[in-house]
Image: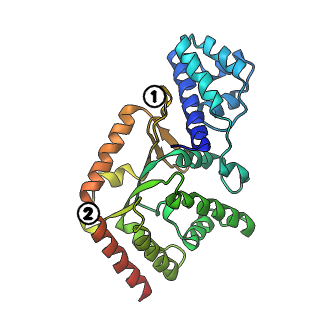
Amino acid sequence: MASATTDCNVARRMLGLTLETMRTKQGISRETAAAAISLARSTLWKLETGQHVRLNPVLLKHLCELYESDPQQTQVVLELIKETTAKGWWQAFSDDAIPKEFGLFVSLEDAAERITSYQTMLLPGLLHTADYRRSLIWAEFPNKPTEEVERMLEVGMTRQQRLTSKEKPLTIAAFIDESVLRRTTGSRSIMEAQLLHLAKIVALGNVSIRVVPLSVGMYGALIVGPFVILDFPPHLKIELSMQPVVYVQGFLGDLYLEQSEEIRRYREVRTEVQRLALDENDSRSLILQIAREYAA
């Protein structure tokens, strides 16, 4: 059963997606819709992208009227508003700890019940050791004050609590290109400890790590690049259930893909990676072998 916070996360994203779909169906621009209810365009954008904004049911009902929604659609919107009241743990952190462009992903990750992560450059954040993550933060933000780096690190470590949570455990299937394991991040000792951590964490029944070996050579998914598929728990009311989301992190902006055709194509890529990857036991053996190489 999802927690209140999980319901809140899903509801906020569902509300935004529902409103955006209704608006685009009517061919109404975001500027026009925002002006019609005396709302800033940026606020409507935040609402449609599932970010935390103060919701006024009266204004959103007017928005539904503008979009000529039927009574059932309007009722769905009003019910979703009721479910967005709980606050997530990440909202206690400042923007320097969770960049605005990443806050949405953190909220969706917290709401998900299952994640598929395919990585070709870095390890999935949920599997980082503190030293590995700290090294990544310094690489991305070399001028950040130490105290801000430590706050960002705290966020990363807090995210990992879902892996051992009894209340709402998160299942993760991680597919990692071998080159990620061989790219030294921080130092050889940090990499050794990180890989030993990977070998240990697979003992959790909800964590699967499979490696695509370099011996495979070039393959299609490398061109597609890293992505994360998030699957969400069903809602008691099927019309309020959140559909899967594909997250693609970009240098100039992140993508959240939600159309059924987009999801289908990424699941096909996942199937290809799954076919090429070593099984869990062989993957663990390779991880330990590379760890020993770092220790030498």
> Residue 90 in the image: x percent, y percent?
66, 51
Q: Is residue 70 left or right of residue 286?
A: right
The residue drawn where x is 64% and y is 64% is 153
How far, Cα to Cα, is label 1 from label 2? 43 Å
Give the quadrant of residue 157: bottom right
> Residue 45 in the image: x percent, y percent?
64, 31
**Label 2: how many residues lie within 10 Å, few (<14), some (14-19) or many (20+)?**
few
Circle nearer the viewer, 1 or 2: 1
The residue drawn where x is 31% and y is 75% is 285
> Residue 72 in the image: x percent, y percent?
53, 15
Question: What coloring was used for the rendering?
Answer: rainbow
Q: Nearer the viewer, residue 277 or 24?
A: 277
Q: Secondary structure at mark 2?
A: loop
The residue drawn where x is 27% and y is 51% is 272
> Residue 252 in the image: x percent, y percent?
56, 47
Q: Secondary structure at mark 1?
A: helix
Residue at image mark 1: 238
Residue at image mark 2: 217
Q: Above or below — where is 11 with respect to 118?
A: above
**Dot label at residue 35:** none
At label 2, which amino acid type do we have?
Gly
Sequence-wise, the earlier of marks 1 and 2 is: 2
Q: Above or below — where is 153 with respect to 117?
A: below
At label 1, which amino acid type do we have?
Ile
